[in-house]
Image (cartoon, helix red, strand yellow):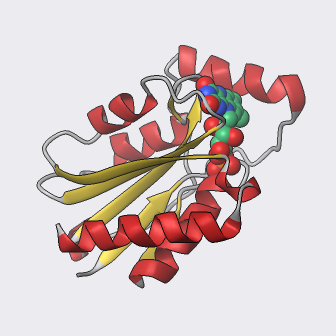
Amino acid sequence: MKTAVIYYSFEGNCAKTAELLREALKADVYEIKTADTKKRTGFAKYAWGGSQVITRKKPELQPYSIDVNAYDLLILGTPVWAGSPAPAMVSFADKTKIAGKKIALFCCHAGGKGKAMDKFKALFPGNKLAGEIDFVNPASGNAGELKQKIAEWALNLTSS
Ligand SMILES: Cc1cc2nc3c(=O)[nH]c(=O)nc-3n(C[C@H](O)[C@H](O)[C@H](O)COP(=O)(O)O)c2cc1C
């Protein structure tokens, strides 16, 4: 099964997850990047990111080329921002036609994902959802446990 992992990551957690999925599934991995690469920290980070969610801003992305139809399974990943998928993944969903595909979703959050997964799902209607999973700041957790959890999920996805 040919698998692609497509993700956005602001602080490395979704990137870490994508890397482990790449290892587990021999997947091709694509990072979605925003045109605005300025790093924000502290309160400014939450104010900047949260206001993008509230105003439904779809940030401009750096150019990418992904032939989604070349894959049997697309795994899409996002951080949770203000109880929603990060705006960059909303831009991605808007720009990229994904229909009639087998997809799986993951999100990374700090313990309060709210309805982010439901909202993430709603960005990709008309596809078959093979699985969904979320992680609490995986880059700073137990690496062995994370690897195990991802390997099990990956196995489920390829056998379903
Ligand atoms: C702007 C912003 C808003 C966030 N909002 C939430 C939130 O609503 N709930 C939550 O649990 N974590 C929230 N977080 C934390 C991230 O979802 C979490 O740290 C995640 O693991 C980050 O993934 P990344 O490292 O791939 O960017 C927020 C982070 C940022 C930068």
- In the displayed structure, would residue 92 be above or below residue 53? below
Residue sitting at x 35%, y 40%: 94
Name the side, left or right, on which 69 lies relative to 9.
left
Residue sitting at x 56%, y 41%: 60
| Image coords of residue 71 (percent x, y) | 25, 74
Q: Nearer the viewer, residue 58 or 146?
A: 146
Name the side, left or right, on which 116 lies relative to 93.
right
Q: Nearer the viewer, residue 104 or 47?
A: 104
| Image coords of residue 158 (percent x, y) | 25, 73
- In the displayed structure, would residue 51 be above or below residue 7? above
Image quadrant for the C terminus?
A: bottom left
Please identify the quarter of the rendering in which residue 28 is found: bottom left
- In the displayed structure, would residue 43 be above or below residue 144? above
The quarter of the rendering in which ligand 1 is drawn is: top right
Observer able to see residue 30: no
Tag count in the figure? 0
| Image coords of residue 40 (percent x, y) | 83, 37
Image quadrant for the N terminus?
A: bottom left
Observer able to see residue 146: yes
Name the side, left or right, on which 46 lies relative to 16.
right
| Image coords of residue 143 (percent x, y) | 68, 67
Residue sitting at x 45%, y 73%: 151
- In the displayed structure, would residue 94 be above or below residue 12? above
Residue sitting at x 49%, y 63%: 149
As drawn, which residue projects farthest toward the right?
Answer: 42
